[in-house]
Amino acid sequence: MLNPSNEQREIRIAKLKKLEEMGINPYPQIYRPTHTSAEIAEKYKELPPDTQTEDEVVVAGRVKAYRNSGMFMDIYDKDGKIQIFCSKEHLPDSEQEKIALIDIGDFIGVKGFVKRTKRGEITVNAQEVTFLCKSLLPLPEKFHGLADVEVRYRQRYLDLITNEESFKTLQNRSKIIASIRNTLTSKGITEVETPILHPILGGANAKPFITHHNALDMPLFLRIAPELYLKRLIVGGFSGVFEIGRNFRNEGISIKHNPEFTMMEVYWTYKDYNDMMDLAEEIIRNAAKAANNGSAVVKYGDVEIDLDKPFARRSMIDLVKEYTGLDFNEIKDLPQAMQAIQAAGIHLDNEPRNWGEALQAVFEAKVEEHLVQPTHVIDHPKEVSPLTKTHRSDPRLVERFETYINTWEMCNAYSELSNPIDQRERFEEQVKQREAGDDEANMMDEDFVTALEYGMPPTGGLGIGIDRLIMILTNSASIRDVIAFPTMRRKD
């Protein structure tokens, strides 16, 4: 945390008291600007240098620069900078007295006339200055800003004040989420909200946060995924539903993982995973354009990623064969898979329990790192996909894809399982895995199976990790850069 000196604070408090003695309220209830910095820049973009207008405007913002004893000030609003000129020719003595009490960090309002200086900068000639908020703590020094990354995340408000890129990233986050919402609602898909407190763990393989409801005297899980509730709405008759909301997973923290994160999940009737690939591409392409002035070609670090072209579509088995030489079409069971993996000298972090886990483990170890340009990895093993329809041409596989961009998993999507008998058997297998010590395995959800027994039409489902997508589209190195208030260890 930043620790400004008590002396600096006392100087500002003395100015605060002086304002009060002058009968000025440094914290008024309201102020009404007539223009933003962007509106002024657009309206007067053709104004020649060294030209004074008679156009009166009212502007407001935070003081970030103070020159020549306040004759020139730069104030910033949500759109950018406005230069203020405080000349004795235009300001009475009472206003000049106020100027002397302004500090960098204060919010002020200014009424005055628009001009362009000889140097070509749009400026407001101040006629009246109003204190809107007296700041008691100084901002970080302009030219060094917040060098401590921890302070940037813990005191995000200071980061946003001093770091234009951070401010722009969070503005772009809003544009990206709005674009996703617009893409889905334009297709007649309904936005809904589902519970965050779940009595049964399900919808994904992940470790949960556990809490307790006192009135009901029952344990509850913060949701790891909204999937099973959204599908209940499809059973209830919705033709398509989506939710953009927080999920919670009690797992590690990294540049790509935060314990609470934003997901978008959509379920659309009479569609399969091929349709969801098309939808995923449209969502991502539109979001890229929203954040990058109409361009779907983005830079992440030194890599240019083209989101405008159709994404590659490759099966997991084909990709594993390409990058390792192992052909899981010819490998029939786990012992044969382990023999081939060992012969190839491939190290796996965890011991697979079946053929499907072996295929996925090799993919994660040797293939993911190559998937820089957008790629849909299709046709996953059934053993690792408990909520997905069996592949129509290979019973060992399911109709599922994950989308990779910059080597990161960005999307997960299925032809959704709608057979209640098959679903029960998949849940029972997950329960066995949970009883064997896998605390990320799904629980049995009897009510969800009952819902399926009433009938769910063919449905495509898609989930997109919003925070990772925003990282790619804003060239952000860490997930903490795109979340306003990331989870941090307590300082004490």
Image (cartoon, rainbow, N blue to C red):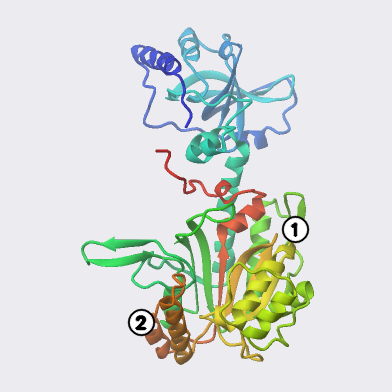
Whether label 2 touches label 1, CB < 8 Å:
no
Vertical arrangement, residue 250 with respect to residue 9, above or below: below
Coordinates of residue 101 in the picture (x, y in percent):
46, 14
Q: CA distance from mark 2 to mark 1?
A: 43 Å
At horizontal 22% and vertical 67% (from top left) the residue drawn is 216
Residue 70 location, quadrant: top right
Residue 447, disc: 2
Any part of residue 314 in sight = no
The one of 95 and 406 positioned closer to us in this rendering: 406
Q: Residues within 10 Å of mark 2 (few under 14, many from 20)?
A: few
Image x and y of residue 38, in percent: 62, 37
Element type where label 2 sits in the image: helix
Looking at the picture, how far across and down is residue 332, in whole percent? 67, 89
Report whether 467 appears left or right of 289.
Answer: left
Question: Residue flagged by tag 1: what amino acid is it?
Answer: Ile
Residue 78 sits above or below residue 232 on the image: above
Q: Quick one: 143 or 432, which is closer to the camera? A: 432
Mark 2 or mark 1, which has the lower sequence index? 1
Residue 429: in sight, yes or no?
yes
| Residue at 40%, 15% in the rendered image | 10
Residue 57: assigned label: none
Find residue 394 and report its image quarter: bottom right
Above or below 154: residue 317: below
Residue position for label 1: 305
- Provide residue 80's location: percent of width, then percent of height: 61, 34
| Extreme residue toward the left, this view | 215
Q: Indicate the amino acid at tag 2.
A: Asp
The total of numbered circles placed on residues is 2
Q: Locate the C terminus by quadrant.
A: top left
Task: Identify the residue at horizontal 64%, vertical 48% (top origin).
Answer: 477
